[in-house]
Image (tube, grey):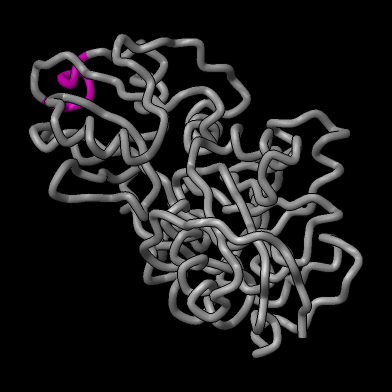
Amino acid sequence: MFDYSCSRRSFLGLAGGVAAVAGLGLAGCGGSEAPAAGSADAAAGVVGEVTYDGASSFQALVEAAAEQFMNENPDCVISGSGNGSGAGLTAVSSGTVTIGNSDVFAETKLDADAAAKLVDHEVAVVGMGPIVSKNVTVDDLTLEQLKGIFGGTITNWSEVGGEDAEIVVVNRKEGSGTRATFEAAVFGEEKNTYKPAQPEQDKSGDVQTLMGSTDNAISYIDFSHFDDSKFTAIKVGGVEPASENVLDNSFPIWATEHMYCAKDADDATKAFLEYMLSDDVQAELVAEQGFIPVSKMAVVKDANGVVTEK
């Protein structure tokens, strides 16, 4: 059983479900030996403080995992925010937080030396897809059409089979893992330099809000933030944006959700990450939150975006 000590502080804003991958362990996250994933001892009696920052796409999932973990371990406090993958990776690299959450591999955002000092835990997979305002009649776009819209060469919905109306492009800010994932799928290795008139959005929740109040708009968001009352998720190349279509890359826009810690992470951080990878959270909560266990994927994607069969 773990034996940890650390200070306690107040925790705010927990809700939702959790994601993780069974059987990956934490051997690279520090020197002490962790109990097997799914065991009762893996999360029992933990005392400490865990902090995180990073991807807003799976912030609610991490919050829910934290809530459940803290219910079982009342002397451990977990708190954090979702300021984007780049912010999370920078924060964990600098030691500002103990966990950095990211939609992308650390080596795509940090220099090689900084990335090498972190340990990756792949906790889930999530699909990400284009969304349009409720008044938009287009329900299917190809990757090439998406490239034209987000690259600024297609500017009117009539050019892609819709009504005669100017397209309002809503983008995430630089540093967003969701944006990096979307642009990698749509633009490949080509750099997108187009700057839409609409201000770039910080978080997935900001995109939800803006899309719910803006006509003729298009953006992108992860499946777990889909909200039919505010916008419409559309098909890509005739394929529905659904988790079952992500499993074999039939739906081509998706990301692995990473939780990074330092190699010398404290015991409370290691215990929480072990819990994220345990059967306690893998069996039900991942799917409940709209995510996919990594173990169910038929394909893998590397840091360069190359997809191969397992």
User: Foreground: 184 or 266?
Assistant: 266
Residue at image location 41% in from the left, 16% down from the top: 151
- Residue 113 rendering spot, x and y as whole percentages: 88, 34
Residue at image location 59% in from the left, 20% down from the top: 190
236 versus 192 height, above or below? below
Q: Quadrant of the C terminus?
A: bottom right
User: Foreground: 102 or 72?
Assistant: 72
284 versus 158 height, above or below? below
Res 90 visible: yes
302 versus 29 height, above or below? above
Magenta span contains residue 127:
no
Where is residue 211, by image quadrant? top left
Residue at image location 59% in from the left, 72% down from the top: 75
Q: Quadrant of the N terminus?
A: bottom right
Residue at image location 47% in from the left, 57% down from the top: 11
- Residue 295 rendering spot, x and y as whole percentages: 61, 71
- Residue 67 rendering spot, x and y as whole percentages: 46, 68
Q: In the drawing, does residue 176 fall left or right of residue 169?
A: right
Q: In the drawing, does residue 190 fall left or right of residue 163?
A: right
Q: Given the current orientation, which residue lies at the most extreme bottom position? A: 40
User: Foreground: 48 or 104?
Assistant: 48
Where is residue 191, by image quadrant? top right
Res 18 visible: no
The part of the chain drawn in magenta is 156-162
